Amino acid sequence: MFFYLHTKQFLKFGYVFLGLLISFGSSPTLDANPSYDEGDIYFFDSVSQNRNRPPQRPHPDLHVPNIPLKQEVTVFSNEPSDKTAYPYIQTTINFVEGNLSLKAFLSDGTEVAYSTRGEHIRFSKCFGDHCIIVSQKNLLGVSNSSTEWEKGHIFGEERYQVAMGHKATLVASERKLYLYNSYTNHWETISLEQETLSGFANLYDKVAIITSRRIIVIDLASEMQYEQNLFLRRIYQFEMRDGFINFYARNKLWMFRHQTEAFEEVDLTD
């Protein structure tokens, strides 16, 4: 009888001990697997294969620089209504971005390269016969009539608006207008003196710029510039045509004739 009780207690103790071994052997083990690509640590349950991802945290050896916010470059839209009937414009030039360089390919197959080392590209586009690049340091332009990228310097402006035409592009800041002329591969700077840009258009070799104080017409081939004071009037509509450009200001019309290269004022109240 004593032997039977002793054996029963021994077996009971053995069953409990075996159960504890099984429970400890089946408990999940956590293996840390650091991912150095993303700076996170992932934990894997070796039994259930469930993957738990804790909140992201950078790797202790990873230095994250304090990068300033990208400065703003927007596409300009005309405030006065542009009624110009633009023809179909085919883009005949393009560029590709390489390692620290940009290469433009002209319509004749010429390759024009520019090193972007030390510069951050903020805007880039090709349209018509030219390409434009805006970086934090420079304005760059190249056209089918050029052999190199033409550089226009900028002086600390933070906000830009860009408007592209077939032969010219306008880059406008709060203080200046920068016009790229694809005919001459040249940047021209126009100061804004207590005035704001309201309209821009480019048809063939003529450029029309409208501000809150004046109208500017530029002939790209000769680089001649013609101005008309608005006398506090507001242009609400304009239209470029082959032989003239019309600027409407309610009861006034200013017509720029290509043949005479002069403005004619027409009273619309009669």
Image: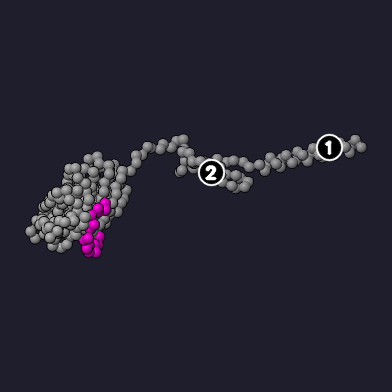
247 is within the stretch colored magenta: no
Confirm whether residue 103 shows in the render. no
Looking at the image, which residue sits at the far right? 1
Is residue 1 shown above or below 182? Answer: above
**Residue at (24%, 45%) from the top-left corner?**
173
For the C terminus, the quadrant is bottom left
Range of residues picked out in magenta: 76-92
Query: Foreground residue, 258 or 268?
Result: 268
Disc marking residue 93: none
Residue 13 picture location, percent across and down: 79, 37
Type of the residue with mark 2: Arg
Residue at numbered disc 2 = 53
Question: Which one is nearer the viewer's eye here, 224 or 227?
Answer: 227
Q: Are marks 2 and 1 in contact (CB under 8 Å)?
A: no
Percent position of residue 252, x then y: 15, 56
Looking at the rendered image, the disc whose residue lies closer to the viewer, 2 or 1, is 2
Q: Which residue is mark 1?
A: 9
The amino acid on which the numbered mark 1 sits, given as a three-letter code, is: Gln
The residue at the point 70 percent across, 41 percent down is: 23
Judge whether 84 appears above or below 132 on screen: below
Instruction: Classify mark 1: residues with Cα within 10 Å, few (<14), some (14-19) or many (20+).
Output: few
Q: Earlier in the sequence, mark 2 or mark 1?
A: 1
